[in-house]
Amino acid sequence: MDRIIGYFIIAIIGFLGVCILYSPVYFILRKKKIPFIKQFSCLLLGFSIFIILVMTIFLGGIDFNPSNRFINFVPFKFLIETYDMGYKAMMSQVVANIIMFIPIGLLLPIVLKKCREFKYTCLYALLFTFLIEFVQYFIGRSCDIDDIIMNFIGSVLGYGIYKLFDKIIKNN
């Protein structure tokens, strides 16, 4: 759990840096009547995608010629086997996989009008997480159906948060 908190702190610091660098662009786009919430959501979505790619592809190293490749097609195998990392570390990874994709489900409908329909948010989130797992297989990392499921759950939770706030805003 300490790793997740550490990643979160690093993400916050990185995001603040991006906001500072983005501030001149904001003032240019403000003159073009692009709403702040849309600009901010685009910035957050881009930053979230960047952080996800760093955490899932680049962190931990890349090996294009791994000695062994691990692939898991059995859903919820982590409940039975924790591999070498132990139960606590495995559950931390499961929680991280869910939390990591909440911003995707939350921000896609704000940024892309098409994604205001649940099916498109789900489709794009599934494609993104599948792409990550596909790439991980070829760079010497594990490819796990559980990661796809947990990422998808995070996206659905994010979409639920979007719908909740959208409903509150429309009712006021």
Image (cartoon, rainbow, N blue to C red):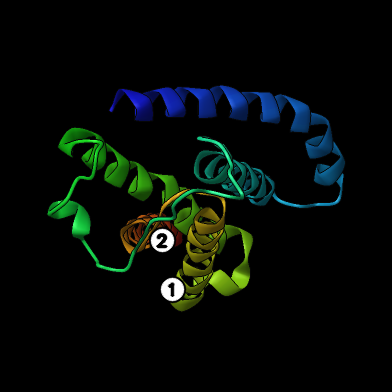
Q: Residue 118: which numbered mark, if any?
A: 1
Is 43 on the left-hand or right-hand side of 81? Answer: right
* Secondary structure at numbered mark 2: helix
Q: Residues within 10 Å of mark 2 (few under 14, many from 20)?
A: many
Closer to us: 62 or 100: 62
Give the residue displayed 36% in from the left and 26% down from the top: 3
| Farthest-out residue, front | 67
Q: Residues within 10 Å of mark 1 (few under 14, many from 20)?
A: some
Q: Position of residue 155 (x, y in %)?
A: 41, 59
Based on the displayed image, in which of its 4 quarters is residue 156 positioned? Answer: bottom left
Give the residue displayed 60% in from the left and 30% down from the top: 15
Identify the image quadrant of the N terminus. Answer: top left
Q: Is residue 6 above or below residue 119?
A: above
> Label 2 is placed on what type of residue?
Tyr
Closer to us: 7 or 34: 7
Q: Disc 2 marks which residue? A: 159
> Label 1 is placed on what type of residue?
Phe
Closer to us: 157 or 11: 11
Give the residue displayed 28% in from the left and 46% down from the top: 94
Q: Position of residue 7 (x, y in %)?
A: 45, 28
Q: Is residue 27 above or below residue 34?
A: above
Is 109 on the left-hand or right-hand side of 31? Answer: left
Q: Earlier in the sequence, mark 2 or mark 1?
A: 1
Give the residue displayed 30% in from the left and 59% down from the top: 146
Q: Position of residue 76 (x, y in %)?
A: 21, 61
* Secondary structure at numbered mark 1: helix
Q: Is residue 115 above or below residue 17?
A: below
Closer to us: 1 or 87: 87
- Asked if the residue at tag 1 contacts the one at tag 2, i.e. Cβ–Cβ closer than 8 Å, the answer is yes
Identify the image quadrant of the C terminus. Answer: bottom left
Based on the displayed image, in which of its 4 quarters is residue 157 positioned? Answer: bottom left
The CA span between labels 2 and 1 is 7 Å
